Amino acid sequence: MKKPKIVDFSRGEIAPPDGKGTIGVVEAMRPSDVVRLAHVSNFSHIVQKDGLAFENELKTAQMMTENVVQFLADPLSVIFGRESGESSNSMFVQNPVTEKKTRTLELFEAYIKGIKSARRIREQAILVADELYTNAMKIGHPHEKMSTTPLARTGTVEFFAEHDERRLVLGCRDSFGELGFSQVLTRISHCFDRGVVHSINQGEGGAGIGSFMVFNTCISYYCGVDKGKSTVVCVALPLGVTDEQLASLPKNIHLVSA
């Protein structure tokens, strides 16, 4: 079992040249700098001391590092720090990759309507769910260079969500394991550095804009990859907050691979 190294920037500790496998504890760090630290310094986790559920986020970072397999198998139990298995506050849908997203998004919309404290973030949550499912589904529909017709591969996309009193967590798992952290972080960084409009004008739209939207909306971004087997991407949204409060909350990021 791999023990993670923790570097507490808020105490003036110095980061290693290569932060792979390291948890960086920070405070009041801007979203763009969180992405930059994960990308340039290769940190696996950035956790904000002044963020929502800091202690839980730190434990999640440790568990994801020590037991990647458990996170990939049951991300919700790891994120919420509970026993494995289904929760009464959760939903789960599994589809073949060829299945359209409409029914799954309708089920999620019905699920989130049952969460009273999610009223203010309902629209953002549905947009994030749409983007996560679309990205997972796209991997199963690769395009050949000489054809404009997508050729679906055999595989599945799972969508799941769970909430407690403070957070709503939603995510997707695909059966391909082809997501690259560097590519995603680069696209998000470009949107922060150049602006969304400029990124679109420069032909850097698509997944880059979508990934930026997802990260910019959530308070925590969790991703695990087992190359060639599965990818899990989850995000946490706060419950019972205003749009202004949501925009000001610090962001955490967690990236692990098997």
Image (cartoon, rainbow, N blue to C red):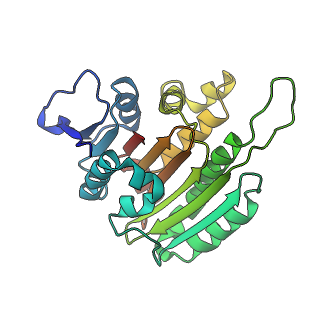
Estimate the x, y position of residue 30 in percent, counting from the top left: 35, 37
| Res 43 → quadrant | top left
Q: Nearer the viewer, residue 26 or 102?
A: 102
Tag count in the figure? 0
Please say if 211 is above or below 145. Answer: below
Please say if 191 is above or below 92. Answer: above
Estimate the x, y position of residue 94 in percent, counting from the top left: 64, 62
| Res 172 → quadrant | bottom right
Q: Which residue is at 40% across, 68% downward?
A: 84
Q: Nearer the viewer, residue 247 or 9?
A: 9
Estimate the x, y position of residue 17 in percent, counting from the top left: 25, 20
Q: Is residue 69 left or right of residue 15?
A: right
Please say if 120 is above or below 186. Answer: below
Q: Is residue 81 left or right of residue 176?
A: left
Q: In the rendered image, which quarter contains the C terminus?
A: top left
Does any portion of residue 238 appear in the rendered image?
no
Q: Which residue is at 76% across, 57% downward?
A: 99
Does any portion of residue 161 appear in the rendered image?
yes
Q: Which residue is at 69% across, 47% downward?
A: 137
Q: Nearer the viewer, residue 164 or 69?
A: 69
Estimate the x, y position of residue 10 in percent, counting from the top left: 17, 38
Q: Which residue is at 55% across, 63% downward?
A: 160
Q: Nearer the viewer, residue 216 or 150?
A: 150
